[in-house]
Amino acid sequence: MVHGEAWTLKEFFTYPNEYIYWTIQIVMYPFMTGLVAGAFVLSSLYHVFGVKELKGIARFSLVFSFALLPVAMLPLMLHLQQPQRGIEVMMTPHFTSAIAAFGIVFSTYAMIVASELWFVYRKHFVESALALRSIPQRSLGQNLGHLLFSALTLGAMDISEHAIEADERAVKKLAGAGIPVACFLHGYAGFIFGSVKANALWMTPLMPVIFICSAVVSGIALCILVYTVTMEIRKFLAARKKANYPELPSPEELKSAEVHVVTMTAKYLLMFMVAAITLELLDLIFRGYTAVKSWDILRAVIYERDFVNIFVVQYGLGNLLPFIMFLIPGVTIRRAVVGSCLVLMGVFMMRWNVVIGGQAFSSSLAGFMHYKMPIIPDSVETFKEGLFGALTVAVVPFCIFYVLNKVMPVFKETH
Amino acid sequence: MKSHVWRPLYIVLLVIAGVLVVRKIIVPADFGIGARGYMYGWHRPSNEQDWKMVKVKYKTREYCKECHQDKYDEIRQSPHANINCENCHGPALGHPDDPKTLTIDRNRELCARCHFRLEYPTSGRGKIRGIDPKTHNPQLECVTCHWPHDPRKEGHSK
Amino acid sequence: MISRRSFCKKSLLIAGGLAVPLAALELFDPKRLLAEKEDGNKVRWVFLVDTHKCVGCGFCVKGCKTENEVPYDANVTRTWVERYAVTKDGKTHIDSPKGARDGFETTKFDIGEGKFEDVKNEDIDKAFFVPKLCNQCDNPPCVQVCPVGATYQTADGVVLVDRTWCIGCGYCIMGCPYGVRFFHPVYHVAEKCNFCYHRISKGMKTECVDACAFGARRIGNIKDPNDPVTKIIMTERVNVLKEEYGTKPQVFYLGLTKEVR
């Protein structure tokens, strides 16, 4: 079986070699990179621009951005026909290709986030290492923990006020450097599509900007979502532990803090959402108005075949509805959670409609292709490029976040 | 540079050094920029040789002629003059050392590739004499009545 | 207040500092400069297709699959033939079942998803066949987008794929406006027509040219003014496919019409 044949339905005239070669994993890829970039931008709003209201969510979104980072690469690896050769992108990069920069931009970005995290958590690492060191008879687990935290300090044990100040300055600089890199990381994911001149739907210079805006939107939405969920868990735990540890914050205190953070974050979400939708609609209007050769088939795809996906699910449920929900004064936690879920779905559908929609028509402009997503996998290929492959990609960041949270507790006050 | 602030940078430099070492090991020595510059010629030149080494399967009528001069002469002066032997007889490949590699195709579909009647006025196809295989002696092989090496002659009964 | 001396010193320093990374780019690519200065090659392979002559027998497709080891029953092919029929109602019908590997032995047009549409001979205003293959573009977009240098153009203009280096990202497949590329079902790397590089480099013709009994396909060297193909391209009205993409395709067509995709 030819790659792509299992999930492609062809209608009217398509070239014999045309299949849907870029599937759900390539939808996941910009979605995940978008979340990484968005989460980072959110945390930088606090670190660089000193938006104090976002303090509560800044550290959280930074760690979450780091947890998402390896996962941005996962869908690409799952999609490659020769994943073991993926490293070649770093070995013999061909910079005339939009993909070639990936290795370098991605690693630069990873290093910036990792360094920033190190500065944020260095005090915690040192304290943990010292605390473990002071235990005279360490168990195996404590020994391992001691080793880990000692290694994580990189030998910098100085936690004097002066040293911590230096850390904070470094965080600010790194966060500042990180914003353009994060935007570049994601903008270039848009460039990968926008520069394909063979594809009438993809080719637009607006693509990178559209991708960045929707990336920030999705990143913020995910942070709101995960933040509220973890806060709920903390409230639950706090209520249980309150009896034993009176010094812990009460559920009421947590709740008021939570509402405040969510309201503030939602404002930024709306701002970026307006930018994203404006650009997307501009692109659509412009295509319709100029109506070049490919418009006939694009119109058939946009207004007929993918109408529900684009106008009902993406714009209606994914943009308009949450927009109204956030705009109505007095945002409650529940409404914010529902709104964030809808926004995430909307951004996912935007990626879907770009990636799959861009392959929904033949480059002969005389036929259509339909992606039938494999649900029950019957081979490695249909697993990777089907529902379960996508779910794997979606679940992994939460697992990583869980582990990271053990080493770098998101909610512990360090500074 | 004494400050602990630079420590992550050392790690970064270590990583870069690691990548450079791996690069030295993995990348073929001849990898480089070819005749068409970096944009169109960034490649491993020895690969061009790899492609030139691909085995030739169809050896053309001139190869067949070396032994089958009579057949060659016959078809070359017939209306089928331009049809290559290997179109129907299969690629010469291991022939004559391994006679089994020749796969002669006597299917009606083979002849119908040209002789299925399609009256396409603006194409060479419309000028070829054709039949509808469904109604034209459906059970028989074409070669029963038509001699493919020279369609003007009668076929052979084999 | 900045003194003139220090101003000059600093601006020189900055200009020099900026020039260092730029110079690195230049060093990166000396051969390219040479190549741009003069193209000393004696060979540039081009292809000529005469759509008037093609009868849609599909022997070229059959031969190509065997010659180039593309699994015979896989629904991908390096070259294919399209059938066009423009009917009296102004509609254009196009198909290429299995890339025309088995020719066209029906008046029905394949419209996908297992459905067929009968186009009666008497309704047809014009009908013809168009063979397709890699255009070996002068500006190959597929090569431009390869992230690792696994596909490239040789000095004689043929675009090849390095099967040991391709990572299988599919970007080149997306980048080709002609739909020429696909994943090889056995090697799982990008695959494409390469003008039978193993044959043309031995002085033979491509398999599709040899298999064509009607002279609809011809290969030639555009750098050789005495080459019959070159003469036709130079003296007759030839056209290329999808010129608007700026790819500078090097497969020339006689008798191309606006319906051809």
Image (spheres, helix red, strand yellow):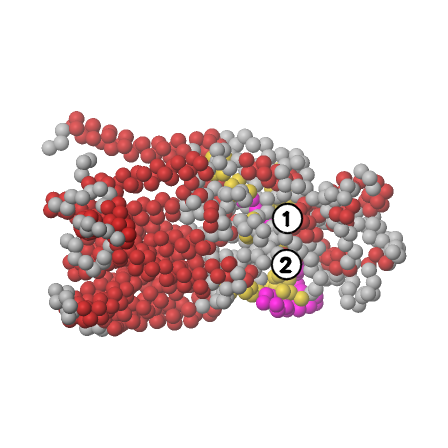
Q: Chain of mark 2?
A: C
Q: Residue at x 77, y 58 (%)?
A: B107
Whether the residues at callouts 2 and 1 have beta carbons within 8 Å, the answer is no
Q: For residue B107: magenta?
A: no
Work out whether C98 lies above or below C148: below
- Badge 1 crowding class, 10 Å Cα cut-off, few under 14, some 14 to 19, many 20 or more, is some
Q: Residue at x 46, y 37 (%)?
A: B27
Taking the image as shown, residue A257 lies to the left or right of residue B147, namely: left
Query: x%, y% of residue C153?
Result: 53, 40
Taking the image as shown, residue A376 lies to the left or right of residue C11, namely: right
Q: Which residues are magenta?
A: C111-137
**Nearest to the observer: residue C236 or residue A366:** A366
Label at residue A306: none
Q: Secondary structure at mark 1?
A: loop
Give the position of the N terminus of chain B as an image quadrant: top left
Query: Callout 2, which amino acid?
Result: Lys
Q: Chain of mark 1?
A: C
The residue singled out by tag 1 in the image is: C69
**Nearest to the observer: residue B8 or residue C76:** B8
The residue singled out by tag 2 in the image is: C98
Query: x%, y% of residue C110?
Result: 63, 65
Q: For residue C133: magenta?
A: yes
